[in-house]
Image (spheres, rainbow, N blue to C red):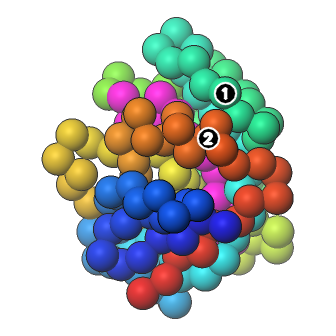
């Protein structure tokens, strides 16, 4: 189990990692665009990564990020909160910065997707100053790679106040 708390710590196997969370904190009532990280316990999906920038070791499914890959954050789309291939998207996975060099999909609002309940919740690379995210959990690249090396398909993430 990975535990994430509102004080900005991700804890796994008694090891504490500094992390960034949504700009407006953690919420039980997540809404699209609210800048909050969702409260709850979630499974982890595949790891998307930039093979031209990083190498990773993990037991989770790995998917190389390719041009045109994005995450649908449009609640009106039938592809809401799913991987898509497009030329235009706010949530393109191949970014110029390094935030999405490694992206772990958090299985939030993914089984029976509810429109406007939030999309594109990931664990990804943090900015150098750990500035807040739009709702994701972010770690520095070294710690994220270390975590990926220790978790498996059964690992869950619990985000709590």
For the point 36% across and 28% down, the residue is: 98
Give above or below for 158 relative to 43.
below
Q: Which mark is residue 57?
A: 1
Instruction: Pick the quarter of the image with the N terminus.
Output: bottom right
Residue 91 in sight here: no
Q: Nearer the viewer, residue 114 or 47?
A: 47
Query: Does the magenta portion include 105?
Result: yes
For the point 54% across and 71% down, the residue is: 3
For the point 62% across and 19% down, the residue is: 66
Instruction: Pick the quarter of the image with the C terminus.
Output: bottom left
Query: Does the magenta portion include 131?
Result: no
Magenta span: 98-109
Instruction: Please give left or right for residue 58 compared with residue 39 in the image.
Output: right
> Percent position (x, y) of residue 117?
59, 77
Q: Nearer the viewer, residue 100 or 147?
A: 147
Residue 99: quarter of image: top left
Give above or below for 110 relative to 147.
below
Give above or below for 95 relative to 31.
above
Q: Nearer the viewer, residue 69 or 14?
A: 14
Q: Give the residue at mark 2.
A: 148
Disc 2 and disc 1 in contact, CB within 8 angstroms: yes
For the point 51% across and 18% down, the residue is: 54
Marks 2/1: CA–CA distance? 7 Å
Residue 137: quarter of image: bottom left
């Amino acid at each position: 189990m990975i535990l994430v708390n509102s004080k900005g710590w991700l804890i796994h196997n008694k090891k504490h990692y500094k992390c960034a969370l949504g700009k407006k904190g953690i919420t039980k009532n997540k809404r699209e665009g609210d800048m909050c990280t969702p409260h709850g316990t979630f499974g982890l999906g595949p790891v998307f990564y930039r093979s031209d920038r990083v190498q990773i070791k993990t037991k989770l499914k790995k998917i190389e990020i390719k041009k045109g890959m994005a995450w649908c954050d449009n609640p009106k789309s039938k592809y809401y909160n799913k991987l898509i291939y497009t030329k235009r998207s706010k949530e393109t996975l191949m970014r110029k910065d390094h935030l999405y060099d490694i992206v772990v999909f958090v299985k939030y609002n993914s089984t029976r997707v509810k429109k406007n309940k939030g999309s594109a919740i990931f664990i990804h690379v943090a900015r150098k100053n750990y500035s807040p995210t739009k709702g994701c959990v972010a770690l520095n690249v070294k710690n994220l790679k270390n975590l990926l090396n220790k978790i498996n398909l059964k690992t869950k993430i619990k985000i709590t106040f």
